[in-house]
Amino acid sequence: MPAAKSQTNIDWISNLRIIALYAVIILHSTSPLLMDYGKVPAADWWAADFLNALVRFAVPVFVMITGALLLHREYEIGDFLKKRLTRVVIPFLFWSLVYIWYSWYIEEITFGPNIWLDVKQVLHLLKNGSSYHLWYVYMLIGLYFFIPVIGKFVRNASEKEILYFLIVWFGVMAITQPYLNRFNPAVDMHYFAGYAGYLVLGHYLAFKDFNVKHLRLWMTLLFIFSVVLITVGSFLIIQYPKYPGTMFYEPVNPAVLMLSASIFIVVKLSVPKVSPLIIRMRDFAGKYNYGIYLGHALVLYFLDDPFGISFKLCTPLVSIPLTALICFLLSLLLIWLINKLPFLGKWISG
């Protein structure tokens, strides 16, 4: 890969990574409102639904960035797993224990005189996730085991073969959705509909030289269409209890796929002229991206209680992005401070 193209990839992917990180914080800031459908003012719920749809690309784009950065490289499997898992697992374990402490602090869990029962409780929480957002790390660890194999496939496959993989992946994803699964044949293809497809899609879109007139405009329109589809679809599906209310929010979903692919391409094709200061700020935050993801939920908890900073501040269209921005900045500060701790800081901060 030419050096110039590599640098370009680094620049726009750095932009995309920060966008996705801010998006995931907005996503989690909308959750309290969305879960109270019918109990909160309709206008507030619709605002949260719209913002949620607008940023649903966050996790898929994280996975696509992983595919864009890793699949084109050759690895010795042992070295790859040791390097990647060390970087991911150690901060993850630290933050898992922090969230176990927080659950104890707010009295969601208790510890008694029986140490063995306490140890079992902690191990159970570590096994299943001690906070709602940590599911992403479990998923990422699973993907890391497959990246050396998937990477070898995409490096040796023709474009036609990669497109075949992506078309089958999309088709299986579609027919395994609620309602559409009635058209699913008896052939079991569920294993083909997971997050691994986003790895391959990210690699393909990152290195594909598109020669389509007005592509950025078309992708912007697709993004807008996807936002409307997810927003309206989420409202409609709630009216039918036999279908999961989060159907349109699920990351492995055709609507979210269109949303994620479109913003991926739009950011790739966009080269904004910004000052060197903005670039330095972006790169500084980017160094702590993983740690911010791990720690932002804790910051959101404390912003809400005791400080009352949440969607309740004012109209959700303003308060949710504002809360997310405050959370982003405070999480960055927190991770930077942890990173400065002697001996363990760089290992546990993320």
Image: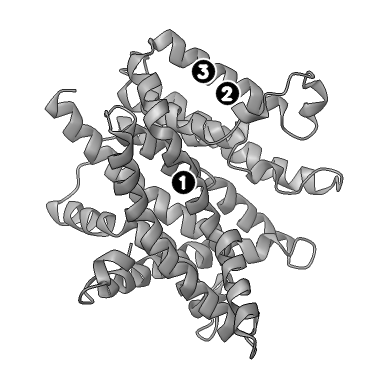
Left or right? Give the position of 279 relative to 133.
left
Left or right? Give the position of 208 relative to 164.
left
Image height of 197 relative to 108, above or below = above
Q: Position of residue 185 (x, y in %)?
A: 78, 18
* Of pointers 1 and 3, the one earlier in the residue sequence: 1
Kind of residue sitting beneath label 3: Phe
Q: Which residue is mark 3?
A: 165
Q: Position of residue 211 (x, y in %)?
A: 33, 13
Q: Secondary structure at mark 2?
A: helix
Q: Secondary structure at mark 1?
A: helix
Q: Are marks 2 and 1 in contact (CB under 8 Å)?
A: no
Q: Which residue is mark 2?
A: 169
Nearer the observer, disc 2 or disc 1? 1
Image height of 137 relative to 269, above or below = below
The residue under the point 46% across, 47% down is 141
Nearest the camera: 132 or 214? 132
The CA span between labels 3 and 2 is: 6 Å
Nearest the camera: 220 or 328? 328
Could you say which quadrant of the image residue 160 lies in?
Answer: top left
Image height of 141 relative to 193, above or below = below
The CA span between labels 2 and 1 is: 19 Å
The CA span between labels 1 and 3 is: 20 Å
Q: Are marks 3 and 2 in contact (CB under 8 Å)?
A: yes
